Image (spheres, rainbow, N blue to C red):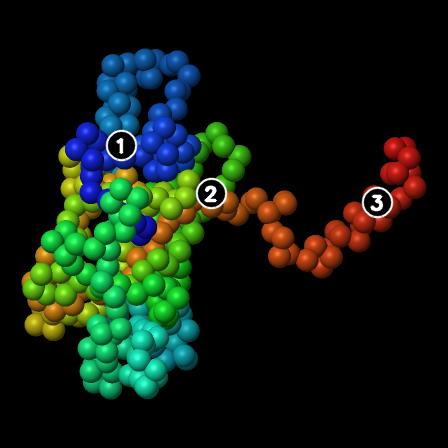
């Protein structure tokens, strides 16, 4: 999630991704329903009403999606391969988090967390908090630190790594199917790239981030993905708003809930206003990703500089053809 700014009172907290004067062609909320050839059914008032209603609901509702993935202690025995594959698709192993400490004397064993917290790394949470820095937000092109507006800590991706992979769990594919439109009359195929942006920590009793709208980092960025790691906390719900509608993602969890540990996630468009409500207890630890619209499958030609074409089956045939004297003479 890139630098953020409070919603403008003249736009009701809603702004188009990228330049305000240019609407990217992939923005689903600006696509019109295709016009069907005239027919007895399509000319009927009921059909027109249905089509208009579907278009309105698409605009009003499809601006955010999310879910949760249960965390399991270990996968099933390797002998049960079928069950193992099914479990991998629906569950997540405990997540290891490692980071660089500002203090050179800190041991590497002290800069690792296993989530949900395990006894051998539980005390390292305090070390992580000490090594993180206050989180800022964007205002007027500047990075501003104001705890009355945002109270949180952060780590840049150059200082930490984790075993969590949103691609492996199918989260990125789900986002592509839900938020990224496929233009019916376009020959291009599009996909989603999730780029790790920050590790954020909101701690009780006052961690929060008031309502704001993110500023996209490039014309191809269309949204953000927030992943809540399995660390006990209360409060800190994420509210995403667009055109008078609100979707709430509440990842509060505790051992007393009896629900088991899970990884919560939410993805939403860049022009949505969103807010992290106050954390009342514990620590809300999240990974944030910027989401980009990129070229997808079926667009190989001229777009894979890392591919060695000499290994492809037709390379020698095509090479011989273009080197033939008849080819050069235009015969």
Residue drawn at the location 71% of the way across and 59% of the way down: 311
Instruction: Determine which residue is flagged by label 1.
Output: 59
Give the x, y percent position of residue 140.
Answer: 26, 42
Instruction: Determine which residue is flagged by label 2.
Output: 190
What is the quadrant of residue 259 in the picture? bottom left
In primary-sequence order, the first of circles 1 and 3 is 1
In primary-sequence order, the first of circles 3 and 2 is 2
Instruction: Determine which residue is flagged by label 3.
Output: 321
200 versus 276 height, above or below = below
Give the x, y percent position of residue 155.
Answer: 30, 65
Between 298 and 235, the residue placed more toward the observer is 235
Residue drawn at the location 27% of the way across and 32% of the way down: 59
As helix, strand or loop, the secondary structure at mark 1 comes to helix
10 versus 126 height, above or below = above
Give the x, y percent position of residue 193.
Answer: 43, 52
Residue drawn at the location 21% of the way across and 72% of the way down: 129
What distance separates the C-alpha of mark 1 from that of mark 3? Answer: 52 Å
Give the x, y percent position of residue 215.
Answer: 31, 43
What is the quadrant of residue 90 in the picture? bottom left
């Amino acid at each position: 999630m890139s630098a953020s700014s409070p919603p403008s009172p003249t736009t009701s907290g809603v702004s188009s991704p990228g330049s305000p004067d240019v609407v990217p062609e992939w923005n689903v909320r600006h696509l019109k329903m295709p016009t069907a050839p005239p027919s007895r059914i399509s000319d009927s008032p009921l059909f027109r009403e249905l089509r208009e209603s579907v278009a309105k609901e698409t605009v009003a509702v499809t601006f955010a999606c999310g879910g949760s993935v249960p965390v399991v202690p270990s996968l099933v025995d390797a002998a049960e391969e079928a069950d193992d594959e099914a479990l991998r698709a629906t569950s997540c192993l405990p997540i290891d988090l490692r980071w660089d400490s500002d203090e050179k004397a800190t041991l590497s064993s002290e800069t690792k967390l296993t989530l949900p917290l395990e006894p051998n790394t539980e005390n390292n949470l305090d070390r992580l908090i000490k090594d993180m820095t206050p989180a800022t937000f964007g205002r007027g092109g500047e990075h501003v630190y104001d705890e009355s507006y945002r109270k949180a800590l952060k780590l840049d991706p150059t200082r930490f790594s984790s075993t969590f992979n949103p691609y492996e769990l199918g989260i990125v594919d789900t986002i592509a199917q839900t938020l990224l439109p496929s233009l019916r009359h376009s020959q291009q195929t599009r996909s989603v790239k999730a780029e790790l942006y920050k590790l954020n920590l909101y701690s009780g009793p006052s961690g929060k981030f008031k309502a704001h709208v993110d500023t996209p980092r490039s014309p191809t960025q269309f949204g953000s993905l927030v992943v809540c790691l399995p660390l006990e906390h209360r409060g800190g719900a994420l509210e995403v708003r667009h055109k008078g509608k609100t979707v709430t993602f509440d990842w509060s969890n505790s051992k007393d809930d009896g629900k088991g540990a899970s990884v919560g996630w939410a993805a939403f468009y860049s022009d949505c206003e969103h807010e992290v409500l106050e954390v009342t207890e514990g620590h809300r630890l999240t990974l944030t990703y910027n989401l980009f619209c990129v070229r997808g499958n079926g667009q190989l030609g001229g777009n894979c500089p890392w591919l060695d074409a000499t290994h492809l089956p037709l390379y020698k045939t095509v090479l011989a053809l273009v080197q033939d004297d008849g080819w050069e003479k235009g015969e």
